[in-house]
Image (tube, rainbow, N blue to C red):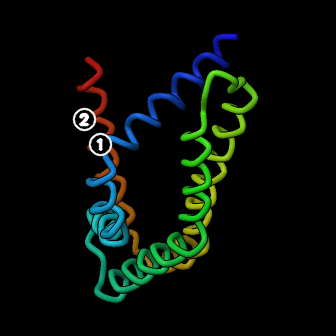
Amino acid sequence: MFGQAYKKIIVVLIFFNLSACSVVGGLWYERIDQLIANQFLEYANFSNAQEDYIRKATSEFKYWNIKNELPEYNKLLLQFRFLDSTTGVGDIDDIYQKGILLGNRSKDFFVPYIVEFCKTITNKQIEEIAIYFDGLMKERKLELE
């Protein structure tokens, strides 16, 4: 019972947040490839060839996402739009599950790129990545205190 109510609250919150941030979301989405690449490039000192590979992968992600995923996101948003008093828990669970699948497909897009990229990283870069994430963990722990 609690899980069903929780999912319904999440769906409602997402609906209101989506409408509130449509302008910011448009600007963000326009630069999604750059944002993802820049985030990844913070992890370590990568070579020019590695940086080019990262930028190529994120650019391909952007175009794949526009072509394949945006129509699916649009369908999902239309389902949000038509929620009403007759909407049942099953309907909300269906929307939730479709959202999870979309997120997983985006994650799965990068798997072959990551596998190829990992063949090129050095031990020094692995250490730099570990230091980066250790620092993030320390920050998060401090935030929780």
State which quarter of the image contains the C terminus: top left
Q: Which residue is mark 2?
A: 139
Question: How dense is the environment of label 1, judged by Cα within 10 Å: few (below 14), some, or many (20 and up)?
Answer: few
Q: Position of residue 139 (x, y in %)?
A: 24, 35
Give the SS element for disc 1. Answer: helix
Q: Position of residue 29 (x, y in %)?
A: 36, 63
Where 113 falls versus 139 (above or below)?
Answer: below
Residue type (three-letter) at the residue carrying disc 1: Leu
Give the SS element for disc 2. Answer: helix
Residue type (three-letter) at the residue carrying disc 2: Glu
Q: Residue 95 vs residue 110: left or right?
A: right
Q: Residue furthest bottom?
A: 49
Q: Position of residue 120 (x, y in %)?
A: 46, 80
Where 79 falls versus 86 (above or below)?
Answer: below
Q: Residue 145 vs residue 83: left or right?
A: left
Q: Which residue is mark 1?
A: 136
Residue at (35, 89) in percent of width and height: 49
